[in-house]
Image (cartoon, rainbow, N blue to C red):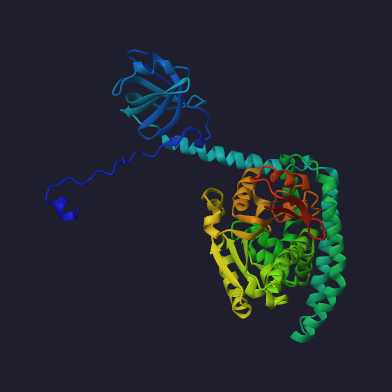
């Protein structure tokens, strides 16, 4: 309807949406239950608790009174509505009018509009502020209580910190002595220094990292929180000097393991503002889990090479491939750079929810596709839609090979099963599905969690095999493979 018609007196259509005052669940204030007493002409004295409140209204819950719902009518009056905190403080005392009433299981819910009074929201906000601060204070005290830290872990932290601080002082002094050198000489000498000292420090840090499981592997989660805080207090600044660890810790894209972190593993690891930070970056980028991550590039490239070679040798059609959670798509680059003749037989879809990752792949791989004749499709799509959005086969077309290198490390068992079934459905009969997941034996686990706050959901070979048992139709074959270090596992399913 036009504005003119409305101006001439016609009624505008009603939207059906009625604006309401902001309602606050009582639980959000952290003050415990709000007790309510009131008087009703037929029900007499009622007592219960508030479910939610607004400035001028409350939702009263009367426990076990659902059968009395019919005795309350809209516009009934409640007298002497008295609302108090557990501490006894009164936040409201006035009359009220019934706006709605209904049963909720065994309870009776009554919506009341206050008359002649209002909820003391400023007091509730004050209580909320103090409650939340107290909770944070409790957490700070719990993590600051070194009496709860295992003595053997204190010794582990102390030994490693003493060694690293001494080596940092030594390297800073050596680097400072080179400041008068020309750039060429400076870089040449620093490279020699790194070649000598790097392996020493890397070996020491890796040995300490791999011994963490013996010291803290059987802690409960709340104990890990305290031990992690203790480790970060004493060693955090040292390890955060490494660009790789700092990016994982800061999570600029919202999660660790983003596409740029993968790039940091694939390029030379001598990154950092000082000799010492470069060595610490080497420690992180050469850990077992990091090397396993690099290994999965060649693993996937080889899995693609075989069917592509067959298609080339038989002058067949393109092999249709999809990478889910593609990241930088490094395996495609390695494959085509090593054998450009496979390009005319490759049709690959790189799918990721991060727009920067997809943009990176477009810039990096488009020239390679043009040079080799490969068809590469760059798709931004959320994992949520893949999990909930229906038939993936209609979105990506049936594929002969589907793989996901690192996405499933972050999925709960429920999401793992849902996405696995969805991808299996998109696989053509006779096709292969490769699902990567880090093994429970990962010796780098606690180093990643304690100093990079990088948490993965580790799974065993048996757990991965169990995931495939519910697939329908039943797969022709199911097995678990791994890259050479045995840290990155791959659930392999043939439909």
Which quadrant holds residue 144?
Answer: top right
In the displayed structure image, the side of residue 272 where residue 391 appears, left or right: left
In the rendered image, the residue lying farthest to the left is 8
**455 vs 225, nearest the viewer:** 455
Please tell me in which quadrant of the rendered image residue 309 appears: bottom right
**Can you see residue 334?**
no
Give the percent coordinates (x, y) of residue 69. Answer: 38, 18
Q: Residue furthest front?
A: 314
Q: Is residue 37 above or below residue 343?
A: above
- Relative height, residue 265 to residue 450 (above, below): below
Instruction: Look at 88% across and 66% down and name the residue there.
Output: 200
Q: Is residue 321 above or below residue 18?
A: below
Q: Could you tell me residue 448's position as x and y percent?
A: 74, 55
Q: Toward the viewer: 443 or 242?
A: 443
Left or right: 42 as drawn, with respect to 255: left
Q: Tell me which residue sits at (78%, 72%) in the image.
A: 275
Count of numbered marks: 0
Where, by quadrant of the figure, is residue 24 drawn? Answer: top left
The one nearer the camera, 34 or 146, is: 34
Image location of residue 76, percent across then percent down: 30, 20
* Residue 469, x across and y down, in percent: 70, 43
Question: In the figure, is residue 171 to the left or right of 303?
Answer: right
Judge by depth and name the residue closer to the eye, 316 or 325: 316
> Can residue 41 be seen from the camera position used here?
yes
């Amino acid at each position: 309807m036009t504005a003119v018609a409305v101006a001439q007196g016609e009624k505008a259509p009603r939207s059906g949406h009625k604006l309401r005052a902001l309602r606050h669940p009582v639980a959000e204030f952290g003050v415990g239950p709000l007790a309510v007493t009131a008087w009703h002409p037929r029900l007499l004295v009622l007592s219960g608790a508030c479910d939610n409140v607004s400035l001028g209204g409350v939702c009263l819950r009367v426990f076990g009174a659902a059968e009395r719902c019919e005795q309350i009518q809209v516009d009934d009056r409640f007298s002497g509505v008295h609302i108090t905190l557990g501490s006894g403080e009164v936040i409201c005392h006035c009359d009220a009018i019934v706006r709605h009433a209904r049963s909720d299981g065994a309870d009776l819910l009554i919506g009341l509009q206050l008359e002649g009074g209002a909820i003391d929201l400023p007091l509730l906000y004050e209580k909320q502020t103090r409650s939340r601060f107290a909770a944070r204070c409790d957490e700070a005290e719990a993590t600051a209580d070194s009496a709860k830290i295992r003595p053997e872990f204190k010794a582990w932290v102390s030994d490693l910190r003493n060694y690293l601080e001494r080596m940092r002082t030594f390297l800073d002094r050596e680097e400072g002595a080179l400041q008068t050198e020309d750039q060429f000489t400076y870089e040449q000498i620093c490279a020699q220094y790194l070649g000598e000292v790097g392996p020493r420090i890397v070996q020491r840090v890796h040995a300490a990292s791999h011994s963490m499981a013996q010291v803290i592997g059987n802690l409960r989660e709340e104990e890990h929180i305290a031990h992690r805080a203790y480790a970060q207090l004493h060693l955090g600044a040292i390890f955060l000097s490494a660009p790789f660890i700092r990016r994982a810790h800061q999570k600029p894209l919202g999660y660790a393991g983003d596409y740029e972190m993968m790039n940091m593993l694939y390029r030379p690891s001598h990154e950092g503002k000082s000799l010492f930070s470069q060595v610490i970056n080497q420690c992180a980028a050469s850990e077992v889990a990091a090397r396993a991550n690099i290994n999965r590039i060649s693993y996937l490239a080889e899995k693609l090479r075989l069917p592509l070679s067959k298609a080339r040798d038989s002058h067949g059609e393109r092999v249709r491939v999809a990478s889910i959670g593609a990241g930088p798509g490094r395996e495609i680059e390695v494959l085509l750079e090593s054998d450009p003749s496979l390009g005319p037989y490759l049709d690959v879809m790189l799918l990721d929810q991060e727009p920067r990752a997809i943009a990176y792949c477009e810039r990096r791989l488009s020239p390679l596709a043009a040079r080799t004749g490969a068809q590469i499709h760059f798709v931004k799509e959320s994992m949520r839609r893949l999990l909930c959005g229906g038939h993936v086969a209609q979105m990506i077309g049936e594929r002969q090979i589907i793989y996901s290198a690192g996405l499933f490390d972050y999925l709960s068992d429920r999401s793992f099963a849902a996405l696995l079934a969805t991808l299996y459905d998109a696989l053509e009969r006779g096709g292969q599905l490769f699902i990567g997941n880090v093994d429970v034996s990962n010796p780098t686990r606690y180093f990643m969690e304690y100093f990079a706050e990088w948490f993965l959901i580790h799974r065993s070979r048996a757990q991965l095999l169990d995931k495939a048992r519910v697939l329908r139709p039943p797969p022709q074959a199911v097995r678990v493979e791994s890259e050479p270090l045995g840290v990155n596992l791959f659930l392999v399913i043939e439909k």
